Amino acid sequence: GRDARAGGTVLAMHADAGHFAALTNSRSHVKRDGATSRGLLVEHLASHGPALADEFLSSHLANMDGFHAVFGNIFGDAPCLRYAWNAPEDGDVPRGEAGAAKRVRWGSGDGEVPRGRVFVVSNENPAAAEGEVWPKRAWLQRE
């Protein structure tokens, strides 16, 4: 479905080109004022494919709330699967504090998803505490 307030969506696929994208929010209580809708990232990735992901992320990432996105292309000779995330390092920021997002360091990353293994995404915050993995995620990766 489409976000009625900001546009965009959390799951999309371009049926002709084979581009797809899925997004989940990153667990955090830090929110940016006037943030770009994360759903617009999904819409862009499904419409334009992974080749233009870096372009969109470089121009919008600094104004987006936390997310995890899995995207790629499943058709053609070179199918690919990528992952990108953005999250605040918000360990000591009080919940709901005005202007908190401006004082918080934000982490982000992206890359190719490794082939031949299970790739699991939860809404945990990879920037907040390294090594802190949700038990469900660890279990799925082991199985």
Image (tube, grey):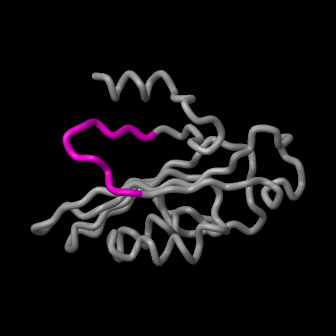
**Quarter placement of the C terminus:** top left
Residue sitting farthest toward the left: 77
The reply, left or right, for residue 106 in relation to residue 75 is right
Question: Which residue is located at x 55 percent, y 52 percent?
Answer: 67
| Residue 91 in the image: above or below residue 70 | above
Give the percent coordinates (x, y) of residue 92.
81, 39
Give the percent coordinates (x, y) of residue 25.
56, 48
Is 118 inside the magenta-drawn segment? yes
| Residue 92 in the image: above or below residue 3 | above
**Residue nearest the viewer, comparing 33 with 107:** 107
Image quadrant where residue 27 sits: top right
Question: Which residue is located at x 84 percent, y 46 percent?
Answer: 96
| Residue 17 in the image: above or below residue 115 | below
| Residue 55 in the image: above or below residue 91 | below
Question: Which residue is located at x 52 percent, y 29 percent?
Answer: 133
Q: Report the number of discs.
A: 0
The reply, left or right, for residue 113 in relation to residue 131 is left
**Residue nearest the viewer, comparing 6 with 26:** 26
Image quadrant where residue 102 sits: bottom right
Is 106 inside the magenta-drawn segment? no
Give the percent coordinates (x, y) of residue 11.
40, 56
Residue sitting farthest toward the front: 130
Q: Give the magenta-colored segment's residue range.
A: 111-121
Give the percent coordinates (x, y) of residue 110.
44, 57
Question: Which residue is located at x 68 percent, y 43 percent?
Answer: 28
Image quadrant where residue 80 sits: bottom left
Question: Majority secondary structure of the magenta segment?
Answer: loop
